[in-house]
Amino acid sequence: MKQNPLTYCFNKAKQYYKDNDLDKTREYLDMGLAQCAMFTSEIMDSLTEEQLDQRDVYQRLHKDVVYEGYPLETWKMRFWVKLENWGLLL
């Protein structure tokens, strides 16, 4: 995968949707969501017990952590919205 995996997956999904290849479109949107999940998991694994005990750690994580210029929460929303709007949810 390229240096900016979220941007790469999002752009490839848009390209395949434009080409009417819905299977590849869904595949790249799913890959983007999987990448977001991997980033979340890596961050959660790096937190201390005290940090994990904070009630809002998960919400703050998605708003405060920035990948490729945007909060992780924004990336997740982008991928989900495209899946929904393009009728690609399984």
Image (tube, rainbow, N blue to C red):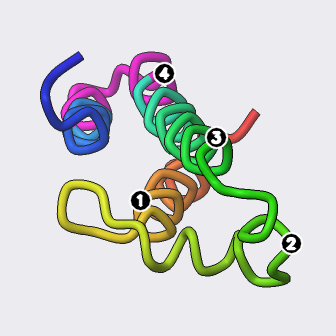
SS state under label 2: loop
Query: Which circle marks residue 11 in the picture?
Result: none
Give the residue pinned by disc 3. 41
The amino acid beneath tag 4 is Glu
How far separated are the C-alphas under marks 1 and 2? 25 Å
Left or right of 80, for residue 48? right
- Classify 10 Å Cα crowding around label 1: few (below 14), some (14-19), many (20 and above): many
Q: Tell me the crowding category of disc 3: few under 14, some 14 to 19, or many 20 or more residues within 10 angstroms, Cα based.
A: few
Mark 2 or mark 3: name the one nearer the start of the chain: 3
- Horizontally, residue 29 falls left or right of residue 15, namely right
Q: Nearer the viewer, mark 2 or mark 3?
A: 2
Label disc, if present, on residue 75 of the rendered structure: 1
Where disc 4 sits, the SS reads helix
Q: What amino acid type is highlighted by mark number 2?
A: Asp
> What secondary structure prevails in the magenta region?
helix
From mark 4 to mark 2, how far is it between C-alphas?
35 Å
* Residue 31, horizontal then vertical, whole percent: 47, 27
Residue 27: numbered disc: 4
- Indicate the secondary structure of the residue bearing disc 1: helix
Query: CB under 8 Å between callouts 1 and 4?
Result: no
| Left or right of 89 on screen, residue 37 | left
Q: Is residue 17 above or below residue 55?
A: above
Q: Residue at x 76, y 33 (%)?
A: 90
Residue range in magenta is: 15-27
- Nearer to us in this view, 18 or 29: 29
Q: Is residue 60 above or below residue 49?
A: below
Going from N to C along the chain, the mark reached first, 3 or 4, is: 4
Residue located beneath label 2 in the image: 53
Query: Pointer 3 and pointer 4: residues touching (CB < 8 Å)?
Result: no
- Could you tell me if the residues under marks 2 and 3 are in contact, i.e. CB atoms within 8 Å? no
